[in-house]
Amino acid sequence: MGKKQRLDKILSNMGYGSRKDIKRVIRDGRVEVNNRIVMDNSLKIDPYVDRITLDNMRIQYREHIYLMLNKPKGVVSSTNDPMNRTVLDLVDIEYLIFKPFPVGRLDKDTEGLLLLTNDGQLAHELLSPKKGVHKTYYAKVNGTVDDSHRELFSDGISLDDGYRTLPAELKIFESNLFSEVELTIREGKFHQVKRMFQAIGMEVMYLKRISMGELKLDETLELGEYRELTEEEIALLKEKR
């Protein structure tokens, strides 16, 4: 059981309109609670227990949602952009009513794991520099990455603006003219992964985030696909706060 809340506040918080809009909807007799039409917008109910319908459609109340998106290239990590397609354009209306937002950003040309939620507290904790939540990327780099670079990254890299990054962990899978690597960082500066490699004279040709904290990208998700996090995945994110 949850805490009792005003009916108009519940419906408004779920994106069904402003409090003024909801008051009109209730006054028009379009809302039922436990199979009875209600006309009092200030009625307090338990949204986790009481059955709410709007225009005969059952409303399943949840305070927060958590979505894992396999972000494709060409979309921006924003809730609104007049010039570009955003990650929210990939999400169905049943989730959009909760007003989710991306936790952090991936560059327009970067693929991979992006968390979408309306849990502002969790987002703050995951992005806080003090928490140092690690993020791991798979990258294809134009250049030969070797063991000497592993040591450079573990010491921290000085970027083009003079900022020195925190120690990062570099794993090398392929060392050739075009190298394949995995890089784990504990901060999120603008274009950080690309700028770290630029600082050693190399260019990132392809970039994909594969994990954030303990949350790992579900590789069964095609680019542009998403799913809700499992209870276990949500617990993993929250227990690290």
Image: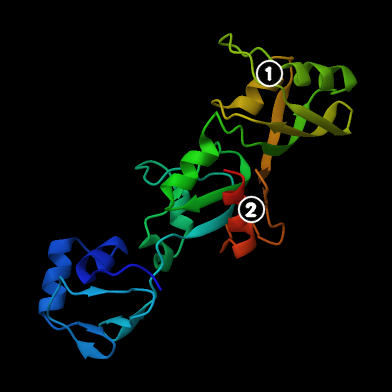
- Give how far across and how far down residue 60 sits, in percent: 39, 75
> In terms of image quadrants, where is residue 221?
bottom right
Question: Along the polypeptide, which appears first: circle 1 or circle 2?
Answer: 1
Query: Where is 185 relative to 161, above or below?
Result: below
Query: Where is 59 relative to 165, above or below?
Result: below
Residue 105 in sight: no
Residue 198: image tag: 1
Q: Residue furthest top?
A: 162
Query: Where is 107 relative to 60, above or below?
Result: above
Q: Residue furthest bottom?
A: 35
28 vs 16, left or right, is left
Residue 27 in sight: yes
Residue plotted at (89% across, 29% down):
175
| Kind of element beneath mark 2 | helix
Q: Nearer the viewer, mark 1 or mark 2?
A: 2
Residue kind at label 1, given as amino acid type: Gln
| Kind of element beneath mark 1 | helix
212 vs 15, left or right, is right
Near-viewer residue (11 or 203): 11
Residue 137: image tag: none
- Give how far across and how far down residue 1 sits, in percent: 41, 74
> In terms of image quadrants, where is residue 45?
bottom left
| Mark 2: few/some/many CA within 10 Å (<14, 14-19, 20+) | some
| Mark 1: few/some/many CA within 10 Å (<14, 14-19, 20+) | some
Q: CA distance from mark 1 to mark 2?
A: 34 Å
Residue kind at label 2, given as amino acid type: Leu
- Give how far across and how far down residue 27 sits, in percent: 10, 78
- Give how far across and how far down residue 75 sits, in percent: 50, 45
Does the residue at mark 1 contact the one at mark 2 (Cβ under 8 Å)?
no
Q: Which residue is mark 2?
A: 236
20 vs 140, left or right, is left
